[in-house]
Amino acid sequence: MAEQNKEGEVETKNCKVVLIGQSGVGKTSIISRYTTNTFKSSLMSTPGANFITKTVFYEKEKINIKFEIWDTAGQERYRALAKQFYQKATACILVYDITDEKSFEEIKTFWVPELKDNAPQNISTLFYINSYIFFSFFSPCFGWK
Protein backbone atom coordinates (compact mmCIF):
# COMPACT_ATOMS: atom_id res chain seq x y z
CA MET A 1 0.00 0.00 0.00
CA ALA A 2 1.35 3.45 -0.91
CA GLU A 3 2.14 5.91 1.82
CA GLN A 4 1.24 9.57 1.69
CA ASN A 5 4.10 12.02 1.94
CA LYS A 6 4.30 14.84 4.52
CA GLU A 7 2.15 17.10 2.32
CA GLY A 8 -0.58 14.44 2.20
CA GLU A 9 -0.01 13.71 -1.48
CA VAL A 10 -0.41 10.22 -2.84
CA GLU A 11 2.74 8.46 -4.02
CA THR A 12 3.35 8.37 -7.78
CA LYS A 13 5.30 5.61 -9.47
CA ASN A 14 6.61 5.77 -13.04
CA CYS A 15 6.02 3.00 -15.55
CA LYS A 16 7.87 3.21 -18.88
CA VAL A 17 5.95 1.44 -21.64
CA VAL A 18 7.31 0.98 -25.17
CA LEU A 19 5.14 0.03 -28.17
CA ILE A 20 7.00 -1.69 -31.00
CA GLY A 21 6.08 -3.33 -34.28
CA GLN A 22 6.07 -2.84 -38.02
CA SER A 23 5.09 0.53 -39.47
CA GLY A 24 1.34 0.94 -39.99
CA VAL A 25 0.10 -1.65 -37.47
CA GLY A 26 -1.66 0.95 -35.32
CA LYS A 27 0.71 1.75 -32.44
CA THR A 28 -0.09 5.47 -32.56
CA SER A 29 -3.85 4.75 -32.74
CA ILE A 30 -3.65 2.47 -29.69
CA ILE A 31 -1.88 5.18 -27.71
CA SER A 32 -4.35 7.83 -28.88
CA ARG A 33 -7.29 5.65 -27.84
CA TYR A 34 -5.76 4.99 -24.40
CA THR A 35 -4.63 8.53 -23.61
CA THR A 36 -7.37 10.69 -25.17
CA ASN A 37 -10.13 8.20 -26.10
CA THR A 38 -9.96 9.28 -29.73
CA PHE A 39 -9.42 7.32 -32.93
CA LYS A 40 -8.29 8.62 -36.31
CA SER A 41 -8.43 6.21 -39.23
CA SER A 42 -5.44 7.79 -40.96
CA LEU A 43 -2.29 9.00 -39.26
CA MET A 44 1.17 9.94 -40.46
CA SER A 45 4.00 7.51 -39.73
CA THR A 46 5.82 8.23 -36.48
CA PRO A 47 9.22 9.80 -37.25
CA GLY A 48 11.71 8.17 -34.87
CA ALA A 49 9.61 8.12 -31.71
CA ASN A 50 6.86 9.96 -29.90
CA PHE A 51 6.38 10.29 -26.14
CA ILE A 52 3.24 10.87 -24.11
CA THR A 53 2.31 10.47 -20.45
CA LYS A 54 -0.86 9.48 -18.70
CA THR A 55 -1.31 9.31 -14.94
CA VAL A 56 -3.87 6.90 -13.53
CA PHE A 57 -4.99 6.82 -9.88
CA TYR A 58 -5.63 3.35 -8.49
CA GLU A 59 -8.13 3.78 -5.66
CA LYS A 60 -7.64 0.39 -4.02
CA GLU A 61 -3.85 0.78 -3.76
CA LYS A 62 -4.04 4.57 -3.18
CA ILE A 63 -1.30 5.18 -5.73
CA ASN A 64 -0.79 7.09 -8.95
CA ILE A 65 0.93 5.34 -11.83
CA LYS A 66 2.46 7.71 -14.34
CA PHE A 67 2.67 5.83 -17.62
CA GLU A 68 5.51 7.10 -19.82
CA ILE A 69 4.44 5.75 -23.20
CA TRP A 70 6.92 5.57 -26.07
CA ASP A 71 5.56 5.19 -29.59
CA THR A 72 8.44 3.93 -31.72
CA ALA A 73 8.71 4.14 -35.49
CA GLY A 74 8.37 0.80 -37.22
CA GLN A 75 10.23 1.68 -40.41
CA GLU A 76 13.48 -0.20 -40.95
CA ARG A 77 15.55 2.99 -41.10
CA TYR A 78 14.62 3.77 -37.46
CA ARG A 79 15.20 0.30 -35.99
CA ALA A 80 18.69 1.11 -34.72
CA LEU A 81 17.13 3.83 -32.55
CA ALA A 82 14.69 1.41 -30.91
CA LYS A 83 17.35 -0.04 -28.59
CA GLN A 84 17.60 3.18 -26.62
CA PHE A 85 13.88 3.14 -25.85
CA TYR A 86 14.02 -0.28 -24.17
CA GLN A 87 16.42 0.96 -21.50
CA LYS A 88 14.73 1.02 -18.10
CA ALA A 89 11.40 0.03 -19.68
CA THR A 90 8.90 -1.64 -17.38
CA ALA A 91 6.75 -3.06 -20.16
CA CYS A 92 6.79 -3.59 -23.89
CA ILE A 93 3.75 -4.00 -26.11
CA LEU A 94 4.47 -5.81 -29.37
CA VAL A 95 1.82 -4.80 -31.90
CA TYR A 96 0.92 -6.53 -35.13
CA ASP A 97 -1.97 -6.34 -37.57
CA ILE A 98 -3.97 -9.56 -37.80
CA THR A 99 -4.72 -8.80 -41.46
CA ASP A 100 -1.00 -8.46 -42.31
CA GLU A 101 0.98 -11.69 -41.98
CA LYS A 102 4.26 -9.86 -42.57
CA SER A 103 3.71 -7.76 -39.44
CA PHE A 104 3.40 -10.97 -37.38
CA GLU A 105 6.48 -12.50 -39.01
CA GLU A 106 8.46 -9.36 -38.08
CA ILE A 107 7.35 -9.76 -34.46
CA LYS A 108 8.74 -13.31 -34.44
CA THR A 109 11.89 -12.79 -36.50
CA PHE A 110 12.97 -9.28 -35.50
CA TRP A 111 11.20 -7.69 -32.55
CA VAL A 112 11.19 -10.61 -30.09
CA PRO A 113 14.92 -11.34 -30.62
CA GLU A 114 15.59 -7.60 -30.43
CA LEU A 115 13.89 -7.43 -27.04
CA LYS A 116 15.71 -10.50 -25.74
CA ASP A 117 19.05 -8.96 -26.69
CA ASN A 118 18.45 -5.37 -25.55
CA ALA A 119 15.60 -4.99 -23.05
CA PRO A 120 15.85 -5.43 -19.26
CA GLN A 121 15.45 -9.10 -18.30
CA ASN A 122 12.47 -8.37 -16.05
CA ILE A 123 10.47 -6.46 -18.68
CA SER A 124 6.80 -7.39 -18.95
CA THR A 125 5.73 -8.20 -22.50
CA LEU A 126 2.29 -8.09 -24.06
CA PHE A 127 1.24 -9.01 -27.60
CA TYR A 128 -1.43 -6.72 -28.99
CA ILE A 129 -3.33 -7.94 -32.04
CA ASN A 130 -4.66 -4.97 -33.94
CA SER A 131 -6.69 -4.45 -37.09
CA TYR A 132 -7.96 -1.34 -38.78
CA ILE A 133 -10.78 -3.46 -40.19
CA PHE A 134 -11.86 -4.37 -36.64
CA PHE A 135 -11.97 -0.72 -35.56
CA SER A 136 -13.76 0.37 -38.72
CA PHE A 137 -16.44 -2.28 -38.33
CA PHE A 138 -16.90 -2.42 -34.55
CA SER A 139 -16.21 1.18 -33.50
CA PRO A 140 -19.83 2.32 -34.00
CA CYS A 141 -21.07 -0.75 -32.07
CA PHE A 142 -19.07 0.28 -29.02
CA GLY A 143 -19.75 4.01 -29.34
CA TRP A 144 -16.12 4.72 -30.27
CA LYS A 145 -15.32 7.77 -32.36
Image (cartoon, grey):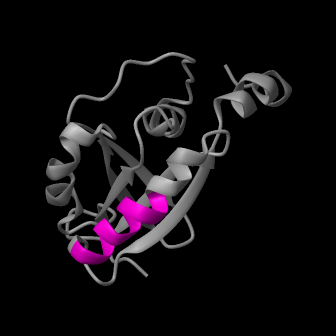
Q: Is 38 positioned to the left or the right of 81 in the image? A: right
Q: Residue drawn at (72%, 28%), measured in percent from left and top?
A: 133
Residue 46: image location, x then y, percent: 30, 29
Where 31 sits versus 105, above or below? above
Q: Residue drawn at (52%, 40%), measured in percent from left and top?
A: 34
Of 114 and 57, the residue lying toward us: 114
Q: How many marks?
A: 0
Residue 75: image location, x then y, percent: 30, 37
Q: Quadrant of the C terminus?
A: top right
Of 41 and 104, the residue lying toward us: 104
- Majority secondary structure of magenta residues: helix
- Is 114 colored magenta in this rendering? yes
Q: Which residues are magenta?
A: 107-117
Q: Residue drawn at (57%, 70%), measured in percent from left and top?
A: 60
Residue 66: image location, x then y, percent: 33, 55
Where 99 sits versus 57, above or below? above
Q: Is residue 57 visible?
A: yes
Where 6 sits versus 130, above or below? below
Q: Is 141 positioned to the left or the right of 120 in the image? A: right
The outermost residue toward the right is: 141
Of 14 and 47, the residue lying toward us: 47
